[in-house]
Amino acid sequence: MNWSAYEAIALVIMAAIEAITIFLALRERRAKKKAEDELNQIHRRGTAPYFRPSEEIVSNLWINTSTGGIACIPSIHPAVLRKSRNEVRIDDSESVFLVVENLGEAAHVISVKLDNETISLDQEPDMDSAHGFQYFVYPYQKAKHGKEQRVSLAFETRSGVQDTHLYVTRHGCRFLQRVDPPLPH
């Protein structure tokens, strides 16, 4: 073999080493990015509220009225979605009350939207016969009954972190599931 054949083999080996080095660096960068993304998701979940339909038994739901008073809605009312009622049976434009519980961190809720329309997340007033239930309130639309809708919950944690989490619900049904950040697998 002559000297130019050795040079060609050396160039091929150096090119292969360079390609392998670049490949390994890209793979390491992707793995690092994936790990950072997973840590970010853990942080987003860990410092945030996490709402789901309440498993508590609701006897009465105490609400603050628009006139500043307090009203009692008995749990048998067809607009109260609770453990023993999975669907409402009400007329259009009546309020739906989806009783929820927060299994995550307490946070100051800035806004709640149902398909980009502002709705309420309220809590029973502080009084002897109330249990502190939290509930979403939104107007019922019979044409949307059972159809999937997006709930966006913008909030600020005690530490000042601001974030927005996305949930899926079914209109007029006792269903609420967080989709972003996703639940761990």
Image (cartoon, helix red, strand yellow):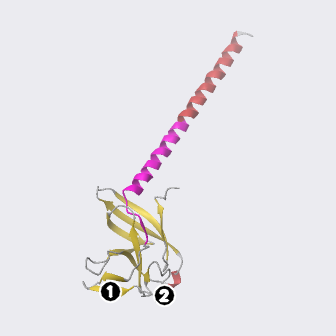
Query: Few, some or many C-alpha atoms within 10 Å of disc 1 (few <14, some 14-19, many ≥20)?
Result: few
The reply to whether the magenta stretch includes residue 48 is: yes
Question: Which stretch did the figure color magenta?
Answer: 26-53
Nearer to us in this view, 162 or 121: 121
User: Please, what secondary structure does the residue beneath circle 2 have?
Assistant: loop
Magenta stretch: includes residue 87: no
Does residue 60 appear to the left or right of 89 in the view shown?
left
Count of marks, rendered view:
2
What amino acid does circle 2 point to?
Arg
Q: Residue 155 location in percent, x, y?
A: 34, 63
Q: Residue at x 41, y 57 (%)?
A: 45
Position of residue 19 measured from the top left corner of the image (x, y, whole percent): 60, 30
Q: Nearer the viewer, residue 113 or 72?
A: 72
Disc 1 marks which residue? 72
Residue located 50% across and 82% down the image: 87
Residue at 35% x, 69% y is 111
Principal SS element in the magenta part?
Answer: helix
Mark 2, Cα crowd under 10 Å, few <14 / some 14-19 / many 20+, is some
The residue singled out by tag 2 in the image is 89
For badge 1, the amino acid type reads: Cys
Mark 2 vs mark 1, foreground winner is 1
